[in-house]
Amino acid sequence: MLRHAEAADGNPDDQRPLTERGMHHAEAAGLAIARLGIHIDVCMSSPKLRAVQTAERACGPLGLSVTSEQALSGEPVDVHALTAGLGDVLLVGHDPSFSLTLHHLTGAQARIKKGGLAGIAKGEMIALLRPDDLLAIANIDEPVAVTEPPLHSAHGSSLARSQLPLTVRQTSCQATRTRGRADAQGP
């Protein structure tokens, strides 16, 4: 179960597109699924634009087309009836129905974050991954804004850190920052 990624505000609700960050997270979900070697036979999505865009970006790296399914529009759904005979299915939809469905299928009291993924096998939740987890698994860097005091060059001039190339990759409890010098390990 993949919850749609971050979407823009606006009306009508069913036509809200993904934000740039949401597109990035959706792509990461598909790449992470591929890197983990998870086999998916079918990708089904809510017909709401933000869910369809999430599904298209996530299922592209998996070589899957997206099937629109009205039952995933945000109301509780009978997953067993919906997916019967289809093999391994990736469902893309909305909360709170996805968190309620996750509880119904597994008994787990968990909330799927926007752009997050829950893996279920034989009535057991086997994975609950946040978008940052999926970015790390997909090995994708997410641009971040930096607001730190200025650095001083060897010549005494002040440099804004935002002028330097910065990449931050979150993995478990470790952050790696690269600014054209040796990597510094964070806590």
Image (tube, grey):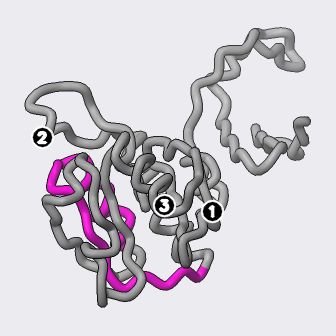
At 67% across and 37% down in the image, what residue appears?
166
> Which label was assigned to residue 39?
none
Determine whether 93 is above or below 154 in the image: below
Q: In which quarter of the image is the N terminus?
A: bottom left
Find the distance from the CA under tag 1 to the CA under tag 2: 30 Å
At 8% across and 31% down in the image, what residue appears?
12
Q: Which amino acid does label 2 sit on?
A: Gln
Q: Which residue lies furthest to the left in this view?
A: 12
* Residue 109 image-quadrant placement: top right
Find the distance from the CA under tag 3 to the CA under tag 1: 13 Å
Quick check: is 55 in the magenta stretch?
Answer: yes
Q: Could you tell which of marks 3 and 1 lies nearer the N-terminus? A: 3
Residue for badge 2: 15
> Which label was assigned to residue 127?
1
Instruction: Determine crowd level at label 3: few under 14, some 14-19, many 20+ residues with C-alpha closer than 10 A.
Output: many
Q: What residue type is labelled 3?
A: Ala
Q: Could you tell which of marks 1 and 2 lies nearer the N-terminus? A: 2
Residue for badge 3: 29
Q: Which of 45 and 186 is in front in this view?
A: 45
Q: Could you tell which of marks 3 and 2 lies nearer the N-terminus? A: 2
At 59% across and 75% down in the image, what residue appears?
35
Instruction: Determine crowd level at label 1: few under 14, some 14-19, many 20+ residues with C-alpha closer than 10 A.
Output: few
Magenta-colored span: 37-60
